[in-house]
């Protein structure tokens, strides 16, 4: 569900201003220079929501924001489990998405967005066997959120 809603928001790209695209590049630079999970999560959210800033559909942006809010805990757990050794993948996917945005290539932007979301869901699906299911947040990393990513 998240992939469908967020990929649809890619339609905002033609309406992004040069300043918004520059902001995306600045945020991505800060993501790459960072190693704190909470800072990463804040910047990642800013990166993605800024990429949708050109969307003129209020209900669509509300849906995307609601999905981001409802999956924040799982993103945090995902980053804690995967650790810094997988951060390069996120950075590479963001770089591809940013390149597509700069070129105004909606096909590539949608493809990279889908892949980015799908890979997150796929990675969290592979960790569903977490033995700490009964523990309350932030300890359980069983990724029951994967239904949002599928």
Image (spheres, rainbow, N blue to C red):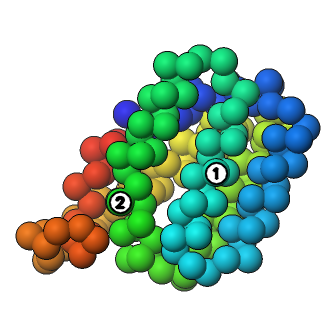
Crowd around label 1: few <14 · some 14–19 · many ≥20 (10 Å): some
Q: Position of residue 44 (x, y in %)?
A: 60, 57
Judged left or right of residue 35, residue 65 is left
Does residue 129 appear anywhere in the picture?
Answer: no
- Label 1 – label 2 distance at C-alpha: 16 Å
The structure residue drawn at horizontal position 73% and vertical position 77%, both measured from the top left corner, is: 33
The structure residue drawn at horizontal position 57% and vertical position 60%, both measured from the top left corner, is: 42
Compared with 127, 143 (above or below) is above
Judged left or right of residue 3, residue 13 is right
Q: Are marks 1 and 2 in contact (CB under 8 Å)?
A: no
Helix or strand or loop: what does disc 2 sit on? helix
The residue beneath circle 1 is 46
The structure residue drawn at horizontal position 30% and vertical position 51%, both measured from the top left corner, is: 146
Is residue 25 or residue 112 the one in the foreground? 25
Q: Position of residue 79 (x, y in %)?
A: 45, 71
Does residue 104 appear anywhere in the picture?
Answer: yes
Judged left or right of residue 79, residue 145 is left
Looking at the image, is mark 1 or mark 2 earlier in the sequence?
Answer: 1
The residue beneath circle 2 is 73
Compared with 109, 144 (above or below) is below
Crowd around label 2: few <14 · some 14–19 · many ≥20 (10 Å): some
Is residue 107 or residue 51 the one in the foreground? 51
Helix or strand or loop: what does disc 1 sit on? helix
Judged left or right of residue 147, residue 52 is right
- Which label is found at residue 84? none
| On-image quarter of the N terminus | top left
């Amino acid at each position: 569900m998240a992939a469908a809603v967020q990929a649809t928001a890619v339609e905002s790209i033609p309406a992004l201003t040069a300043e918004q695209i520059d902001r995306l590049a600045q945020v991505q630079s800060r993501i790459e220079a960072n190693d704190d999970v909470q800072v990463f999560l804040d910047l990642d959210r800013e990166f993605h929501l800024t990429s949708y800033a050109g969307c003129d559909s209020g209900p669509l942006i509300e849906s995307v924001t609601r999905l981001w809010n409802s999956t924040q805990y799982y993103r945090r757990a995902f980053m804690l489990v995967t650790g810094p050794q997988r951060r390069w993948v996120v950075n590479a996917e963001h770089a591809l998405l940013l390149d597509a945005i700069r070129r105004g290539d909606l096909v590539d932007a949608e493809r990279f967005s889908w892949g980015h979301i799908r890979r997150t869901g796929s990675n969290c699906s592979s960790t569903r066997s977490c033995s700490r299911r009964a523990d309350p947040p932030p300890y359980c990393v069983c990724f029951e959120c994967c239904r949002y990513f599928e």
